[in-house]
Structures are given as C-alpha cells and as structure tokens.
Image (cartoon, rainbow, N blue to C red):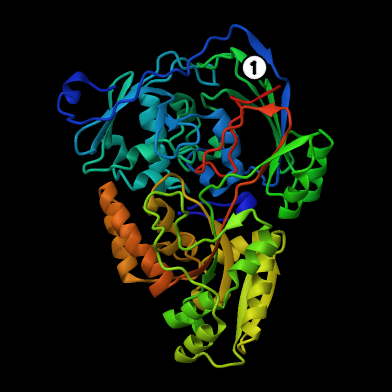
Amino acid sequence: MALWTSKANRLVRAPSLRVLTSILLLSGLALSAPRSSLARNSAGFVDSGTVTFATGGGVADIDPASIVTAAANVAVTANIDEGLVMYDGSNVDKFVPLLASSWQSNADKSVWTFQLRHGVKFHTGRCCMTADDVQYSIARTIQAGLAGAYIFGRYMTDPMKQIKVIDPYTVQFNLGRPQYTFINAIASKNAGLILDSKEVKKHATKSDPWAHNWVTDHDAGTGPYVLQSWQHNVQETLVRYPDYWRGWSGKHFSKVFMQEIPETATRRELLERGKADLTFALTPQDDVALKSNSSVRVTAPYGTEIDYIALNQSGPLGSPLARQALSYAFNYDAFLAAAYHGYARRGYGPLASILSGYDPNMFHYHTDLAKAKALLQQAGIKQGTTLSYMYVTGYPAERTAGLILQAQLAQIGITLQMQGVTQATQGSVYFGNSPASKRPNLMNYAWWPDYNDAWDECIVMVASASAGANGANMGYYHNKQVDALLADMKTASPDKIRSDARTLQDITSRVDPPAIWIAEPAQVTVLAHNLQGYVFNPLDVQIYSFYPMYRS
C-alpha cells in the first residue's frame, strides 16, 4: 500500500495467451485474440518533430511495480513500457495483442496462456524478450510489495509458481480458480509492464532484492520511446526507440517533451501561444473559453473518475443517519454549475457510470434540507455542531464543494469549518496512520479504477481493510456486508460481480453512505489544432500514448 494524492497527480493504491497445444485441447470455450495488425516496418518514417505535453503533476517513479502512486508516473511508463495486451482504442471491454501475439483461457478462466511476440528488443539493447521476462516482471510486481502489488495479488499468492514458463515464447498463468477479470487487469497500464529481467536482476541487492531503487529511475522497457533525460519536478524528454518492434512507418513524433507546470494559467498560455501541444486539468472557465479558440481543440469525453467527499466514521458522522443527512444537504446542481460549468455529471455511488456493474436504477439523493435536518436530529446531532472539511487549495472544485455545503449546513444550524491544505499535506493526512478520531470530519477526494471491474474500483474506497494508510478509505468506513460483497466479487463470475456490485451500490449510497458522491467529471484535454491521433480510453485517465500521434 502507498500514499495517494488527488486529481492532477492522483495517487493510486498502495489500493494482469496462443497456448500449448495440449493445454488448448482442454480449454473449451477459450478466448483467442486475432493476429495483431499492429506490427509495422520502419520504411517511410515521417518525422512530426517534437510533441510538447504540459502536465500539472510531477513524475517521481517509473518502476512498474509502484507507478500507481501517481498518474504522472504512468504518463511516462505508458510510453516507454508495454504489457501483454491493451484495450482496443476507446473500448473498455475489448482487447488487442501487444507483447503477446495471442492468448487463450481454459473453460472456467482459471488458466490463461499467452503466446509471446518474437523479436522484441529491450531499451537496454538486449534481444529478445522471452517468457522469463514476463514471469519475472509480473511476479516482481506482487512480491516486491510495492504500490501495485494489489492488482495482481488479487489473482496470485505464489506468482513464481503460478506463472509458468512453458517455452521461451509461451507463458501460462495458473490462477487456481476462475478469474474472469484477469484479462482486464493484464490490459491495465498501471501494472503488468514487462521489463528486461536480466538487467533488473543485475541491480538487486540484499537490502533491495527487487532492485526498486534502480528501476525507479531507469528505463528497461520495450515501448516506442526511450527516457532520454529527466529533471525531477521540471521536465522529462522521451525520444523514439529506433528498434521498436512495431516500427516507425508513417507519421510519428520523434521526441516527446513533458513539462511539469502546476499553474493552470501558464499551461493555458503555452497552448494558446503554440508552445505546447496538449494539456489537461485546466479550470472549467479555461475550458469554456478555449472552445472558441481556433488554435486548439477541447475534447471532453467521460472517463471513470468519481469525485466524492469522504465522511469520517468517528465523531458526529458515525451514524448512517448523519451521513444520509449530509447527502441530502448537499446542493448537487449548484455544485456542478459552479465548479464544472457543464463539464461534469452527477455521481451516484462508488462506480462511474461507464464501469461494468454500474446500476443506473440505484437510489439517487436529491437536495432536501428539511429531510437533512430531521435525519440529523434522529442521529443526535445538535444544532451548533461544528464539522471540519479538508480540501486542497490548488483544486478550485474542492473548495467550491466545501463552500456550497457550508452554506447549506448553515441553514440547518451546522457549522462547516473549511481547511485548505497543500496536496502534500492532504496525502499525509488522508493516507497516514492517524486514527479516525484525529482526521477531519469531511475530506474531498477523487478516484478511478485500474481496469474495468467493480471490485477494483470499490476495494480501495470502501473496504474496511483499506482504511488509513492501507488504502483510500480515509474515513475508516466499516460495513460487514460491504466487506463480504467485496470478498465474493474478488473471484466471482461476471454476472455475480454485477449482482454484488448493485447491492454494494445500494448500501453505499442509500443505506450506509461512506461519502457524499458528488460528480463524474469529464476528462477534458486541450489539444493543439494540428495534433492528430489522440485516442482516449475511459480507463486511461490522465494517460496519453504518443506513438499514434502526429502533426497534420
């Protein structure tokens, strides 16, 4: 488990197959990927020059075993490292081969086998990638015990035994029980990235057996770009890898320049002056204004992010009735209008509406101060009670949410004390070891999943085991029925996962809410008008793949 931060540099938890012929004969209705159409030759490379990415977050770590500690980390690794498969364009349910040329599972989805692509060269110069690299890379993600361990730890407890090298280009995952979502996790850009195992092992030490200290800032991947330089908290430069297995035929950028610029006004100015090609996380006012600027394009698809205000189970909000009251007190329409200017929609629970398992018919809170007041009285919350609300000063939407709730609660005799902090302070409070009694009553945050799965999205926010430093359950929410549902979802069939998810959503919204679920923000990206090839996947929030991009 690890620390988290919010939104523009969100920390994720510290809260994934052509098969041997003899195995395939037993596989029943197995899933098989088509032969990849991705491989290209390098003839006819047309250099689009440099693409400049103005990002608000700082890159701290490029180790695939721990990159989920910040979206900014994944922005780099998504371009220098690769996994076995990937999501098909904008689709969250279909997959295409990447380092694997094909794959298959047995009938009950307990065994998954991948046939690997031949001739894949690492940035270290070594050729070629084999099943040993796959086995080591994914087992290392679990055994190193770093931030990404939970992603594959869900499926394997003894990865060096459960990941079998059948031959140099065939690797098999024996999960020991049906695991229908394994392919979803394998496709995630947050884990499952394959490194040069021989090079990594060279840098292992007694005190650092998984060479995390070396991998943190060294490139040992297979992706289209190589990390050329890195000035921490300032910029990163990636350059095209000439020996990339997909080749460089057609238009591509030969260089990617990432500038770390926290100030939204500066990033907007760079886009408008043609000094940057893309950015995200500007203010909604900027997004609205830029729509009329012909030098840029504003895209605003919906992703999988949920914005919420976590409610501390200790103190006045310990009763479900009190938490229901605050959910009725919040003015959702006013918040969406003031904070997002049309670039968000209501959030109704821990699942974003695009995710598998989302229930469109779940209970929906509406603003009702009379009901909120009555519920507070039933919960024994007296008028004149003061509640504390923590937010990051650099995120206007978080402050706006607090001000709206403050005004609402004032009308029913409750004082909301606002506490604006830095992102670093927020992370130390939310994801530190302090008990619930030492935490604010209300804490603003945002979350999105690693892959399309209700368990993966919910486990970190609402599981009792994810409280405090163990996840993103910063309010120490505890509900035995929710924990049981999550335990069942971990190994259930897709239909059972969806059924459990519907029950979980009802509990965490209507019955026993751990949070005020306030919004699903659009994932706004501002692009230079001549930047082409950008493809958004709802699961890849704040992640950009530059290989398909070019300048028209």
Residue drawn at 37 percent across, 18 percent down:
35
Q: Quadrant of residue 319?
A: bottom left
Q: Residue furthest right?
A: 273
Badge 1 marks a residue whose secondary structure is strand
- The spot of residue 383 in percent (x, y) is 58, 92
Residue drawn at 51 percent across, 23 percent down:
222
- The spot of residue 239 in percent (x, y) is 66, 23
Residue drawn at 41 percent across, 68 percent down:
363
Q: Quadrant of residue 478?
A: bottom left
Name which residue type carries label 1. Lys
Q: In this view, does 228 lie above or below 426?
A: above
Crowd tier of the residue under label 1, counting other residues whose Cα lies within 10 Å: few below 14, some 14–19, many 20 or above: many
Residue drawn at 72 percent across, 59 percent down:
394
Q: Is residue 130 above or below residue 162?
A: above
Q: In this view, does 431 lie above or below 353?
A: below
Camera sees residue 523: yes
- The spot of residue 545 in percent (x, y) is 58, 31
Q: Mark 1 points at which residue?
A: 251
> Which quadrant of the figure contains the C terminus?
top right
- The spot of residue 337 in percent (x, y) is 67, 63
